[in-house]
Image (cartoon, rainbow, N blue to C red):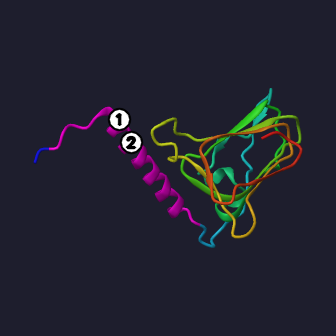
């Protein structure tokens, strides 16, 4: 028996179901595994007029001793640098799993955390998943502002700490 052609509504529902299945696969793949690494961001690029701490999360040269922050319960510390540029941007460049984010700066400047992918059909492709083995993940913003321009996933929500704006 011949199937009738798919309607645009049917195709839209199938596309939504595929996106949900992809998201669930990402969440299952990044389920806390007990392996975490704390990382301290040390990438500071200074010029004669200003300095910035921008770079890729996946580049080990941007992290102290080459240790990239990763894993449930892991800490990504972006608080140790003083830079004079208005904002510094870190791009995820791949899905990242982390338990705590710390944003601060010695001067009144902002942090921006971007997904490198702008593909709206695959929002989880460069997503940030927050996970801890106990309690809730923490995002601590002690400077002016931290902006997360990426899909954020997690099962425990998160706690926002610090006097800055998220």
Q: Is residue 68 visible?
A: no
**Quadrant of the rendering where the C terminus is positioned:** top right
Q: Which residue is mark 1?
A: 9
Which mark is on residue 13? Answer: 2
Q: Is residue 95 above or below residue 65?
A: above
Dot 2 falls on a residue whose secondary structure is: helix
Placement of 8 over or under 60, stated as above or below = above
Which residue occupies 73% across, 69% down? 134
x and y, in percent, of residue 96 in the image: 59, 54
Q: In the rendered image of this protein, does residue 37 appear above or below residue 14? A: below
> Could you say which quadrant of the image residue 86 lies in?
top right
| Helix, strand or loop status at disc 1 | helix
In which image quadrant can residue 60 be found? bottom right
Q: Residue furthest bottom?
A: 34
**Per the image, is 23 magenta?**
yes
Q: Main secondary structure of the magenta part?
A: helix
Name which residue lies at 69% across and 70% down: 133
Mark 2 Cα-neighbour bin, 10 Å: few <14, some 14–19, many ≥20 = few
On the rendered structure, is 6 left or right of 15? left
Residues at discs 1 and 2 in contact (Cβ within 8 Å): yes
Please give the range of residues in magenta: 3-31
């Amino acid at each position: 028996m011949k199937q009738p052609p798919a309607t645009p509504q049917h195709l839209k529902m199938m596309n939504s179901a595929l996106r949900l299945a992809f998201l669930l696969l990402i969440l299952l793949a990044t389920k806390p595994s007990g392996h975490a690494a704390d990382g301290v961001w040390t990438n500071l690029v200074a010029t004669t007029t200003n300095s910035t701490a921008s770079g890729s999360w996946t580049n080990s040269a941007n992290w102290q001793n080459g240790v990239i922050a990763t894993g449930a319960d892991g800490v990504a510390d972006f608080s140790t640098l003083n830079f004079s540029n208005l904002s510094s941007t870190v791009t995820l460049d791949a899905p990242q799993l982390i338990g705590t984010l710390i944003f601060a700066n010695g001067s009144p400047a902002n942090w921006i955390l971007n997904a490198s992918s702008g593909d709206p059909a695959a929002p989880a492709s460069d997503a940030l998943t927050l996970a801890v083995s106990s309690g809730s993940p923490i995002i601590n913003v002690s400077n002016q502002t931290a902006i997360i321009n990426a899909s954020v996933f997690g099962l425990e929500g998160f706690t926002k700490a610090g006097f800055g704006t998220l």
